[in-house]
Amino acid sequence: MITALHGFLGLPDDWSFLRRAGFDVITPDLREIPQEGDTLLGYSLGGRLALHALLNGARYRNAVIVSAGLGVEEGREERLAQDEHWGERFEHGEWYTLMRDWNAQPIFGGHAMPRLESDFDRRELARQLIEWSPAALPPVAARVHEIAIPVLWIAGSRDPKYVAEGRRAVELLPRAALWIAEGAAHRVPWEQPEIFAAQLREFVQMN
């Protein structure tokens, strides 16, 4: 069973491609992450929350962290101010322009995932951006060695910031491997769903 945590602006249906690939998947509310299970899969914001859940005692057989980092250690005030600015826009800004600007960020490499305003609580989106910002959550580099289960860390080759984070993470984790998805940017699972599913299946079967 895969416990899949989506990223910011994510929806449970984002993981339907894994069900079509034959996986059993549950998609909990990010505020209610189950405290035990087989595989904990977290993407971006969900990856950050997955790491914190594991460090706070959640018991899983293995974990997959996608396009996430170890937290902001320097420049925390600047990053938090940036997320607060986005939070204000997500709560009050015009939706079409907001989606255009959000998807235009270099980190996404031109890949867009259409989103309807009616699918979201905009106040909740703003809260997530601010309260779960990598500058608001404590950085985990000093503690990540405590995660003793096998971990597959994934980043896209066109997402250099998170490739670097992945390389650093696997050096600190006791039992970790890094897969860099060639040609992908931040949204690896939806840019390369078939290859992603194959990597996930191989990792789960081995661990």
Image (cartoon, helix red, strand yellow):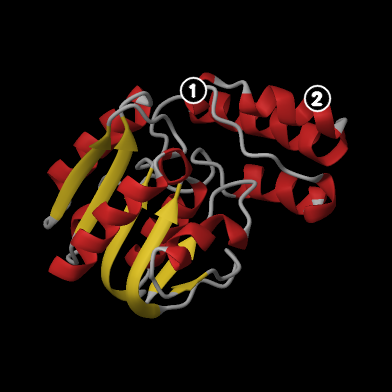
Give the residue pinned by disc 2: 97
Q: CA distance from mark 2 to mark 1?
A: 18 Å
Position of 37 relative to 162 (above/below)? below
Residue 30 x, y percent position in the rendering? 57, 63
Q: In the orientation shown, which residue stands out farthest toward the bottom?
A: 36
Q: Nearer the viewer, residue 21 or 166?
A: 21
Q: Amino acid at mark 2?
A: Thr
Question: Which of the two labelled residues, at mark 2 and mark 1, occupies the earlier sequence position?
Answer: 2
Relative to 26, 10 lies left or right: right
Q: Taking the image as drawn, is residue 3 in sight?
A: yes
Residue at the (82%, 45%) spot, across then down: 117
Position of 35 relative to 90 (above/below)? below
Residue at the (48%, 44%) spot, across then down: 190
Relative to 163, 86 lies left or right: right
| SS for dot 1 | loop
Q: Amino acid at mark 1?
A: Gly
| SS for dot 2 | helix
Residue 76 x, y percent position in the rendering? 49, 30
Position of 187 relative to 199 (above/below)? above
Disc on res. 88 = none
Which part of the image, by quadrant, shows the N terminus?
A: bottom left
Relative to 199, 131 lies left or right: right
Q: Taking the image as drawn, is residue 143 in sight?
A: no
Residue 114 occupies which quadrant of the picture? top right
Residue 93 x, y percent position in the rendering? 86, 31
Residue 110 occupies which quadrant of the picture? top right
Q: Nearer the viewer, residue 79 or 207?
A: 207
Residue 69 x, y percent position in the rendering? 37, 40
Query: Would you say the residues marked 2 and 1 are in contact, meaning their CB atoms lie under 8 Å apart?
Result: no
Give the residue pinned by disc 1: 109
Q: Residues within 10 Å of mark 2 (few under 14, many from 20)?
A: few
